[in-house]
Amino acid sequence: MQIINGRVPQAQRLVRLSHTLSRQVRQHVAWMDYYRTHGHNAALTCRYFGISRQTFYRWKGRYDPRALDTMEPRSHRPHHVRQPTWSSDVAQAVRRLREQYPRWGKDKLVVLLRREGRALSTSMVGRILVSLKARGVLREPPPTRISARKRRPRVYAIRKPKDYVVAQPGDLVQVDTLDVRPLPGVILKHFTARDVISRWDVLEAHTRATALTATRFLDTLQARMPFRVKALQVDGGSEFAAGFETACQVRGLRLFVLPPRSPKLNGSVERAQRTHTEEFYEVSDYELTVPALNHALRDWERTYNTIRPHQALAYRTPQECVAQWQRQQRPKCH
């Protein structure tokens, strides 16, 4: 074996240590050997191994070449662990009540225990429950998934696939409803459809939000969009199921339904609802009859799509955006 200044070279040393020490110790020893053989340059060592200086100096302070077991990772377990302060009789009482009422939390169990003359804090009952479960003593019945409101399986609507590409107008139109309350006790349902590329909006009001009125709005949507609609995205509202879903299937429109409690995935039309509320409903005088309101909405829809500059479209209108897209789609003459 070749000896250099009374020390074993780094490579041979690590081979010798590999049979007796753990991988972590061998790694830490490699840091120290590199540091020693490269002029005690800590910055160079940290860059070479991709570690922080704080980490290097922490292990350097523990390094003892005559006792390499000091380089083993130490347990972070505290020296003084909190010991249970309850008796087995109290633990059995908590277990008995929890097994009798498996869906009652620790707060309710505290009240029941107090009725039995056992004054325990809520946190202690919680710790007892955790201890019983960790020991496998308390085994609660698995929940049975039932619901009073049965959701009918969607026969056509699906989650939007991750690989679905939205690149041109009509690829995805988001649809949503808004409650309009102009007077106490008066509720109207406002439907908005927004194309996510061109920001072209179609608006219509109804007295109710049902599958029938949603299907009627579908007729309006397809008639007023200046391009072919390929897919719709809706939330899980009942108005977008049943007959509406069937109508989309018959017309060859792909229908994507959002996961529960995820309105941000329909963020484009949600933002449109705010705009129509602030710039039409809050500043316009309109009659409370649905025909009159829809007449006023149609005028606002034209203003919105053809006059109002959109910051998201570089201050162009949706009409200008669609016109530019249509020009790009025309075949060039040679």
Image (spheres, rainbow, N blue to C red):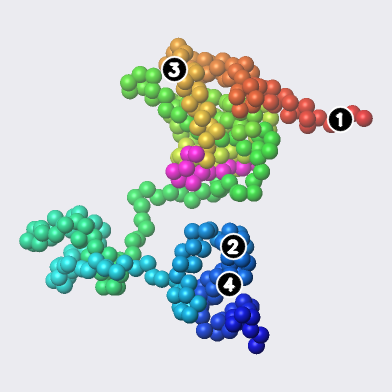
- Looking at the rendering, the stretch of residues picked out in magenta corresponds to 252-264
Q: Which residue is mark 3?
A: 282
Q: Earlier in the sequence, mark 4 or mark 1?
A: 4
In the image, residue 57 lies at what x, y percent? 49, 63
Instruction: Decide: few, some or many residues near mark 4? Use Cα within 10 Å; few <14, some 14-19, many ≥20.
Output: some
Q: Earlier in the sequence, mark 3 or mark 2?
A: 2
Q: Residue 172: horizontal and vertical position, in percent?
A: 62, 37
Q: CA distance from mark 3 to mark 2?
A: 69 Å
Q: Residues at badges 3 and 2 in contact (C-beta under 8 Å)?
A: no
Q: In the rendered image, which residue does mark 4 sit on? A: 33
What is the C-alpha distance between the residues marked 2 and 1? 66 Å
The three-letter amino acid code for the residue at tag 4 is Asp
Q: Which sits earlier in the primary sequence, circle 2 or circle 1? A: 2
Task: Judge depth for marks 3 and 2 and give the one in front.
Answer: 2
Q: Residue at x 44, y 43 (%)?
A: 261
Residue type beneath disc 2: Asn
- Helix, strand, or loop for circle 4? helix
Look at discs 3 and 4 and give the one toward the viewer.
Answer: 4
Furthest residue in direction bottom, as rendered: 1
Mark 1 — residue? Answer: 332
